[in-house]
Amino acid sequence: MARIHVVGAGPAGSIAAMNALRFGHDVVVSEDHPAAGVPENCSGLFSIDGLQTLSDFIDYRKFIIQPIHGADIHLVDQNLSVRRRKPVGYVCDRKAMDHHLASRAECEGAKINYGERVSNRFHADNIIGADGPLSTVARHFRFRPIQRHVSTLQAVLPYRAKDPGVVEVFLSNSRFPGFFAWIIPHDEYAAEFGVGVELPDKPLESWKRLLRLKSIHNAPPPKGAVIPIETRSQTAMRIGKRNILLAGDAAGQVKSTTGGGVIFGGNCGALAGRHALAPKRYEMEWRLRYGTDLAMHLIIHDYLASMSDKEMSAFGRRLKKLNCDSYLSRHGHMDRPTRMIGPAILLHLMKNMTGVA
Ligand SMILES: Cc1cc2nc3c(=O)[nH]c(=O)nc-3n(C[C@H](O)[C@H](O)[C@H](O)COP(=O)(O)OP(=O)(O)OC[C@H]3O[C@@H](n4cnc5c(N)ncnc54)[C@H](O)[C@@H]3O)c2cc1C
């Protein structure tokens, strides 16, 4: 049995702690805040498939706020309408989820020190830095920094969605440079409004644009946060007798297209807990399992971010002519683009090529 120090009791940290315990280790967790899940900086939208991959750690059904079965993706003035008959995702109560994960880690035997901010003193030689996008652990051990981040603003506002099971996404690099705006319904009467722009752009103008788009006046001040949108080039190292692993946002295990990091970060957290004494094994295994999908998210992000509004509108028209909305409705996957690519896409394109300008 070895002693593991997990820094951060977000989803990646709590899951890492649980799995380290299950692999026979002794675990202490430091959490800066007085409780897990605060402050809340997350839309709480997860794919059902993704949540199921974490079912050894969380019974997500307790935290569902709103099932999601579709998306209206506005590419400037073109709308791709993606619909499923059954829900593909859930909006969940993220604060309650984090709280539950941390409590479960405690019940399984982790000691969590709330209100303990780690800077340069560690409780063990085996360290898992799950301390979010501005990771102190990564900085302290001089991991190469993540260069690319999105800056976000978001608030829950009164809103009557036409269909509360459908999220709205707005892409336009003149209005939301390098990322997008979103409206995620919580029920028939409220929705989370959010905008993200890639740094060094600032999100306040984009926030005002989103409110104007929906004729919303007198909104409360939004909350701000950052999301890493590239994976760190190295996420684990051994220095002398110390093993240092990074997981979750600290490692940049986030979908660059949407900023979603709980599913990949949680799964990588589980691997970090399992391989806490084997940095090379951890690095190899998470990249093997999730690296291609995360790289594809970045490629798609960069492709979309490179377009002028005119190009994006033309791209949207082209996708509609190719009936890509119906392809996404049948084969779309919120987390793993690699699962959307296969014989089905070739068949679809072949069927729809005729008559496309
Ligand atoms: C606006 C917004 C919307 C989002 N929406 C979604 C979404 O819908 N779906 C999704 O999957 N993801 C979403 N994300 C991303 C998601 O929130 C993150 O990917 C996720 O929280 C990462 O989990 P984590 O455990 O790695 O880090 P965090 O959740 O950031 O947890 C890190 C923890 O470490 C603690 N900590 C930090 N530094 C120290 C220190 N020095 N000492 C001790 N403790 C420390 C922090 O207090 C925190 O509790 C969103 C992000 C934002 C900003």
Image (cartoon, grey):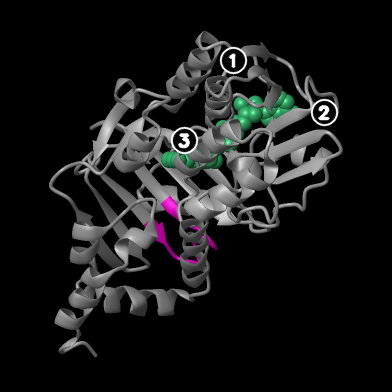
Q: Secondary structure at mark 1?
A: loop
Residue underneath mark 1: 35
Q: Which mark is residue 119?
A: 2
Q: Quadrant of residue 5?
A: top right
Q: Is residue 224 above or below residue 3?
A: below
Query: Which mark sits nearer the N-terminus, 2 or 1?
Result: 1
Percent x, y for residue 86?
16, 43
Query: Which mark sits nearer the N-terminus, 3 or 2?
Result: 2
Query: Which mark sits nearer the N-terminus, 3 or 1?
Result: 1
Quick check: marks 3 and 2 in contact, CB under 8 Å?
no
Disc 2: CA contacts within 10 A as few (<14), some (14-19) or many (>=20) = few
Viewer-side label of 3, 1: 1
Q: How far separated are the C-alphas under marks 2 and 1?
A: 19 Å
Viewer-nearest residue: 161 or 115? 115
Q: Secondary structure at mark 3?
A: strand
Residue at horizontal 47 percent and vertical 45 percent from the top: 260
Viewer-nearest residue: 124 or 181? 124
Identified by mark 3, the residue type is Ala
Viewer-nearest residue: 345 or 202? 345
Residue at horizontal 67 percent and vertical 13 percent from the top: 114
Disc 3: CA contacts within 10 A as few (<14), some (14-19) or many (>=20) = some
Identified by mark 1, the residue type is Ala
Percent x, y for residue 151?
60, 49
Which segment is the magenta one?
Answer: 170-181
Viewer-side label of 2, 1: 2
Identified by mark 2, the residue type is Ser
Figure quadrant of the N terminus:
top right
Figure quadrant of the C terminus:
bottom left
Q: Is residue 356 above or below residue 337?
A: below
Residue underneath mark 3: 155
